[in-house]
Image (cartoon, rainbow, N blue to C red):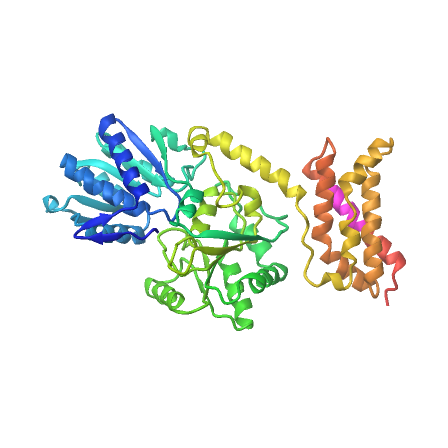
Amino acid sequence: MIDTEVKDNERILYPFQERTIHQILDEILSQGQDFNLLYQLPTGGGKTVIFSEIAKRYIERTEKKVLILTHRIELSVQTSKELDAINVKNKIINSSVKEVPNQKDYNCFIAMVETLNNRLQDDENFLKGIGLVIVDEAHYNSFRKIFQYYKDANILGVTATPLSSNKALPLNDNYDKLLVGESIASLIEQGYLANAETYTYDVNLHGLKIGSNGDFTVSSSEVVYGNHFMQEKLLFAYEEIAVGKKTLIFNAGIETSMRVEETFKKRNYPIKHLDSTFSDKDRKDVLKWFRETDGAILTSVGILTTGFDEPTVECIILNRATRSLTLYHQMIGRGSRVLENKNSFLLIDLGNNVRRFGLWQDYINWQDAFKFPDRFLEARMSEMEDLQFEADFTFPKGIEEYIDIDKLKDFNIKEIYQECIDKGSKGKEAVDQSLENHFEVIKEGAEDYFHGLELMEALTPHIEHRLKQYTKSITKSTPNYFKYLMETYVRQLRQKLRENLDDE
């Protein structure tokens, strides 16, 4: 979050923040009660500072109260502290608050959405005199259940990514207009955000499955990222780019994160694991250790994407793949805080996420995303699938000692396929030539048949990658055909190795 100064209970705002506050208040106060506004600002741009100041000025101008909704207790506490700093009397509505008899003593209430929903179900007038409802992290759909109780109030949603967490419930159902704030590139240029130095490592994501929420499932991610090869790739990337840097590693599953901790501890790197099952005390202890330890590494799962602010983070590692643009921006944003001696941070992508979404700093047409979310998401996902097949393949570490990798790289199955078609041959000949190519490099490097099988196993991801490129070239291809092609290819390659290599 961008730091600003408080002096005499007045927040000294940056010029873009002051402009934004005027814009938002003018929109809300001029449009009348039947108007809801959504505001977009990148992670790290100071959303809490902005909407807290909006709350203060709205209260002063209308003499009505403000309700701020959050989905995590950390965000509630953070917001309350911000309001205290600018002298706005506020109260947090948590699970221990059953009633608020002294409401006249407060101008602003901060509530966890589930807690407030329970109170409103018992008493629709649980909080009185609310003129403005501010929704932090407005892309989450849990807030919708509260809106029915405040039909006579304006709603201001605030988010870094104006895309609903549920594709079936778009944000334009509840918000009349989107106001787009400063872009990431603009905030970097003005010195308000640190720039990301991005490093990508190609990862074979075959085996990932998409769940009902539209993202890759945790169980399939655990299989892909929990294996020895991926652990080694993570360690290699860290040692190549980020040794000694304070690092956050984001994982999809708890088992993967715990294996990461184990892998790094074997190399004597200072690392701790953190996930949502930790007690409040243990979590605070881990975060305190991370804050105070030079070069500390924190590997985590689904807990530090919102409500966490540690300015000293120097490196973000995405040790996972996601199809959520929101999550992508939230994870990277944890490293974007500017300090006196920090105007950039490292980003290591081990999930092909940069290829899927573009660089974190790239321009995004958020108005298009807000107005036509289905079209916006479908275009990005189809582009992802196309680009995936064009990627250079990354071979397993150490295999170059046995395999002539250049001979594999020089074989372009799409070009071979086209040559076959151009001369009137069957396109399937390209697969036969590919099989021969794999056989030759394994035969040259294998000590015997069993060693050849080990090398073939190590090259299985490359075989899959190449055959996907082939099936992408032909006009009629189905998942079943690819499965048949893969099984046949592996069986024939194994047979050729058996016939040509000594099995002693």
For the point 24% across and 40% down, which residue is it? 54
Q: Residue at x 43, y 55 (%)?
A: 343
The quarter holding residue 64 reads top left
Magenta residues (range): 483-491
Q: Foreground residue, 236 or 44?
A: 44
Q: Is residue 274 visible?
A: yes
Q: Could you tell me residue 276's position as x and y percent?
A: 40, 57
Quadrant of the frame with the C terminus: bottom right
Q: Is residue 462 left or right of residue 445?
A: left
Residue 490 belongs to the span the image colors magenta: yes
Of residue 244 and residue 327, the one placed in the foreground of this image is 244
Instruction: Let me know if residue 323 is in the magenta part.
Output: no
- Percent x, y of residue 406: 77, 54
Q: How many marks are shown on the rendered structure?
A: 0
Where residue 272 appears, x then y in whole percent?
45, 66
Query: Which of the 4 quarters of the picture holds residue 483?
Result: top right
